[in-house]
Amino acid sequence: TPAKRRPPVPKPLSSFDVDFSFPAPPSLCAVQLTGSFVSWQRHIALLPPSPLDAKPVWRATLSLRAGMYFYKFLVDGGWKVGPERTVKDDKGNVNNVCVVGEAREVGFRLGRCA
């Protein structure tokens, strides 16, 4: 009997560790992140600043596939955009934008969405 051949195992899609940060004092209660990378369906908690940080910055690192993502921060219950790279959508909402991976020639730095 001929041996059965297994189908090839698909290669995993490349993903990149992307740092998100929001400059804010540690006295805040919570800084969260949401965006198109989670279909705007859940909030991701950012870690509060370390007492050793020269400038207080809340941080999170996500593993994302190459592409363009829109995102926003939820700071103590209120929507905020970060200080860099904002765009306005067709409904007038202002969001941050991040380009990851192969799309980096657009002018964004790979692996950093602040």
Image (cartoon, rainbow, N blue to C red):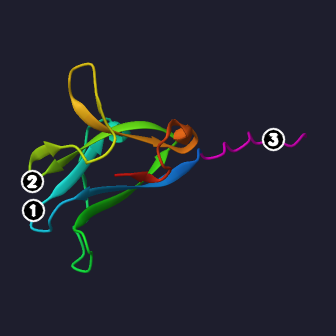
> Could you tell me if the residues under marks 2 and 1 are in contact, i.e. CB atoms within 8 Å?
yes
Tag of residue 5 = 3
Observer-side mark, 3 or 2, equals: 2
Residue hosting label 2 = 76
Q: In this view, does 62 lie to the left or right of 4?
A: left
Q: Does label 3 or label 2 sit earlier along the sequence?
A: 3
Tell me the quarter of the picture where residue 72 sits: top left
How far apart are labels 2 and 1 at the CA level?
Answer: 6 Å
Q: What stretch is highlighted in magenta?
A: 1-12
SS at badge 2: loop
Looking at the rendering, which quadrant does residue 94 occupy?
A: top left
Task: Please state which amino acid type lies under the numbered disc 2.
Answer: Asp
Q: How far apart are marks 3 and 2 (CA)?
A: 56 Å
Q: Residue tagged by mark 1?
A: 29
As drawn, 97 above or below 62: above
Residue at 56% x, 39% y is 105
* Residue 20 percent coordinates (x, y): 34, 54
- Toward the viewer: 68 or 81? 81
Provide the secondary structure element on which disc 3 rests.
loop
- Residue at 25% in and 47% down: 82
Q: Where is residue 33 drawn, in percent x and y? A: 25, 49
Residue lying farthest to the top in this orientation: 90
Position of residue 110 in the picture relative to residue 31 (left or right)? right
* 7 in the magenta segment: yes
Judged from the image, the secondary structure of the residue bearing numbered disc 1 is: loop
